[in-house]
Amino acid sequence: MPSIFSLMNPANGYQVWFTIYLYCLPLLLYAAWAALSLMDLGESTEPSGRAGWAAFVILVPLIGGACYLLGAATILRRSPRVAIVVTGLLVWLLPLAYGWWWANGPLGPKALI
């Protein structure tokens, strides 16, 4: 009896690229933004709201870290925080949007085979 993996076609470049941008890069962004946010929270001198922000950053992936970095972070300067969030979103979403358009574009999904 053959395994399910023996019946699959070899992965092409589009599948590898889509996997990286759809699965790996959001996890890396979450890790980076959460780590920066938690480091800023740890060095903050204001004890009020630290537990709430920490829970929000950890429990709401991507949005929690981005919101904290853009709105409430105090140790890091504003321009690096905005650059970190905006550049991360651009690096993730622009190629993903292009790939989605390319897959559903004028040639259709069968053009990728």
Image (cartoon, rainbow, N blue to C red):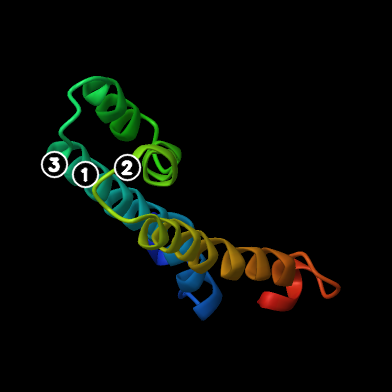
Q: CA distance from mark 3 to mark 2?
A: 10 Å
Residue in the picture at 42% in, 43% down: 62
**100 or 69, which lies in front?**
69
Q: Quadrant of residue 72?
A: top left
- Where's the N terminus, which quadrant? bottom left
Residue type at numbered disc 3: Glu
From the viewer's perspective, tell me whether residue 47 is left or right of residue 89. Answer: left
From the viewer's perspective, tell me whether residue 104 is left or right of residue 51. Answer: right
- Which mark, by number, is residue 43? 3
Residue 61 in the image: state x and y as whole percent.
39, 38
Q: Are marks 1 and 3 in contact (CB under 8 Å)?
A: yes
> What residue would you read off at disc 2?
73
Is disc 1 surrounded by few (<14), some (14 to 19) or many (20+) residues within 10 Å? some
- Where's the C terminus, which quadrant? bottom right
Could you tell me which secondary element the residue under label 2 belongs to?
A: loop
Could you tell me which secondary element the residue under label 3 belongs to?
A: helix
Q: CA distance from mark 1 to mark 3?
A: 5 Å
Among numbered discs 1 and 2, the one appearing first in the sequence: 1
Q: Are marks 1 and 2 in contact (CB under 8 Å)?
A: yes
Could you tell me which secondary element the residue under label 1 belongs to?
A: helix
Residue type at numbered disc 1: Asp
Q: Is residue 22 visible?
A: yes
**55 or 6, which lies in front?**
55
Residue in the picture at 42% in, 65% down: 20
> What residue would you read off at disc 1?
40
From the viewer's perspective, tell me whether residue 34 is left or right of residue 68. Answer: left
Residue type at numbered disc 2: Ala
Residue 52 in the image: state x and y as whole percent.
29, 21
Q: CA distance from mark 1 to mark 2?
A: 6 Å
Count the marks. Answer: 3
